[in-house]
Image: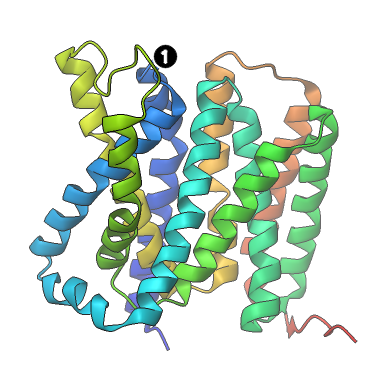
Amino acid sequence: MPTSTETRNGLFAAIGAYFLWGFLPLYFKFLGETAPTVILAHRIVWSVPTALVLIAAAGKWGELTGLWRSPRVMLTLLASSLAIAANWTIYIWAVTNGRVLEGSLGYFINPLITFVFAAVLFGERFRILQVVALAIATAGVLNQTLVVGQFPWISLSLALSFAIYGVIRKTTPVDSRVGFGMEAIWLAPVAAAYLLFFLPSGTHAFGDGDPGYVALLLLAGPFTAAPLILFAMGARRLKLSTIGVLQYIGPSLQFVLALMLGEHFTAGHAVTFGLIWLGVMVFTLAGRQPKFVAPAAD
């Protein structure tokens, strides 16, 4: 059972993760015309040395090497690495193709899926106002879906892949830095092989070698590691339902960035934004309400 200090630290960690994720589209925009697959490969490759430095600094090297004696944990981290790789791929593609709003919608939907996982997989109890908040947020998501006017495959795939990642990391008994390092190690061979041998003709791993551009690519590791490690710290210390509500921070920031980047905005978008944040505010009032458990399926 987490102590109050652990819960508070988890809360700060999760909030920090979502703020960093909220501003992540700016990083991808700075990379200009770089292909999404090249960005993804650099994120993975440079995450490995970043994670190893953090693990060594924390004195967790023995825990990393000890993972090889725990096949179950290793396979679990392989599963989480595949889930986050899918999430990264879709999101990078969305941002680099001017679809930040659809990406933000995905992370608005994500807490709804997280709530379902929390009830079905972990038996978490929900207060009456939390359910009201969920209904309000659902109305916002439905409104945004109608405004988009097409099947929101980007949004739904982002939501599902990250919810799966969150569940796996919550149930994996490993330090956040060690877990992230092992995920990166699982993915790195494929990413490195792509950069070395499978780039499209005329494409170079470091572009034209401009120092500023190269520096941005090298920063992919720290920019990837920091929020994921903070997220894992929060996920291990907080209820999954709490994580679900905090996740509205990231897409809200992304939503604002999308407007600043000139993406199309209508009155329907404004309604969505208002409903989502109304749901969050209602959720914060839920502490005084009696709990109830959702009825089990027959």
Q: Position of residue 212 (x, y in %)?
A: 19, 17
What colour scheme governs how the chains and residues are painted in the rendered image of this protein? rainbow
Q: For residue 40, which quarter of the picture?
A: top left
Give the position of the N terminus as an image quadrant: bottom left
Left or right? Give the position of 207 relative to 272. left
Q: Position of residue 233 (x, y in %)?
A: 35, 66
Residue ID for mark 1 = 33
Q: 241 above or below 68?
A: above
User: What is the count of numbered marks?
Assistant: 1
**Residue 223 in sight here:** no
**Residue 236 in sight here:** yes
Viewer-closest of 97 and 79: 79
Q: 76 above or below 182?
A: below
Q: Residue at x 64, y 43 (%)?
A: 106
Q: Position of residue 61 (x, y in %)?
A: 12, 70
Report the amino acid beneath label 1.
Glu
Q: Mark 1 falls on what kind of element?
A: loop
Q: 293 above or below 243?
A: below
Give the position of the C terminus as an image quadrant: bottom right
Left or right? Give the position of 271 relative to 21. right
Q: For residue 45, which quarter of the picture?
A: top left
